Structures are given as structure tokens and as C-alpha cells.
Image (tube, rainbow, N blue to C red):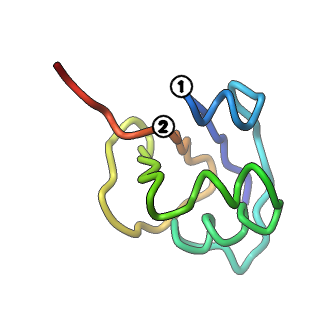
Amino acid sequence: MRVKLLYFAKVKELVGLDDEIIDLPSNVINFNDLKHYLILRGAPWSEIFLPQNATRCALNQNLMNSNFNIEAGSEIAFFPPITGG
């Protein structure tokens, strides 16, 4: 399944990319699977998904707060927590 990953702010700095299109293996069907798959890439992914980093995610421009299923053609964005002031 092919998906587009987008990176913003600190996540973008760590990854060194604005975006990428990847083909996921058939066993990656939800967001938790995706996180584990990306962590296997090693650094910086293992750092991005540390619990204390609280990396946020959006699916097709909708902010997600929990696990969700991924479909072919999905756009998944990663960014640090949003703060206001």
C-alpha cells in the first residue's frame, strides 16, 4: 500500500525531508503498525516516536488522537505538539 508522509517543524528537521511516498508492507494496517515500522528505520525515527516527544499526527488533514486504520493513498503528516501563547 502506497502512502504519502509529510513532515513539519522539528520532525522535518530530524528526518531531513519535507515529504516522501512509501510502499508499506501488508502487515502495516494502522497507525501503531506504521509507528513500529518507521522505528525499525532507526534514528531519527526511534527518537521521533519516544513517548516524551509527543509527536502529533494528521490523516488526510484531520488531526488524529488515537490509533487509526491506514488506506492506500492516505496522506499522513507528522509534527510536534502545537503550543500557543
Asked if residue 84 is positioned above or below residue 38 in the image, the reply reads above
Instruction: State the residue at coordinates (46%, 64%).
Output: 51
On the picture, is 46 further left or further right than 48? right
Q: Residue furthest front?
A: 52
**Residue 13 position within the rendered picture, expressed as x and y whole percent measured from the top left:** 67, 27
Please state which of residues 7 and 49 is positioned toward the viewer in this rendering. Answer: 49
Instruction: State the residue at coordinates (76%, 62%).
Output: 24
Q: Looking at the picture, which amino acid does disc 1 mark?
A: Ala
Which image quadrant is residue 18 in?
A: top right
Q: CA distance from mark 1 to mark 2?
A: 6 Å
Instruction: State the residue at coordinates (56%, 47%).
Output: 74
Work out which quarter of the rendered image holds the C terminus and state it.
Answer: top left
Asked if residue 56 is positioned above or below residue 20 in the image, the reply reads below
Which image quadrant is residue 38 in?
A: bottom right
Instruction: State the residue at coordinates (52%, 41%).
Output: 78
Asked if labels 2 and 1 touch by Cβ distance under 8 angstroms, the answer is: yes
Q: Looking at the picture, which amino acid does disc 2 mark?
A: Phe
On the picture, is 51 further left or further right than 85? right
Q: Residue furthest bottom?
A: 27
Q: Residue furthest left?
A: 85
Which image quadrant is residue 47 in?
A: bottom right
- Residue 9's tag is 1
Residue annotated with mark 2: 79
Work out which quarter of the rendered image holds the N terminus and state it.
Answer: bottom right
Looking at the image, is mark 1 or mark 2 earlier in the sequence?
A: 1
Secondary element at tag 2:
strand
Please state which of residues 26 and 11 is positioned toward the viewer in this rendering. Answer: 11
Q: Residues within 10 Å of mark 2 (few under 14, many from 20)?
A: some
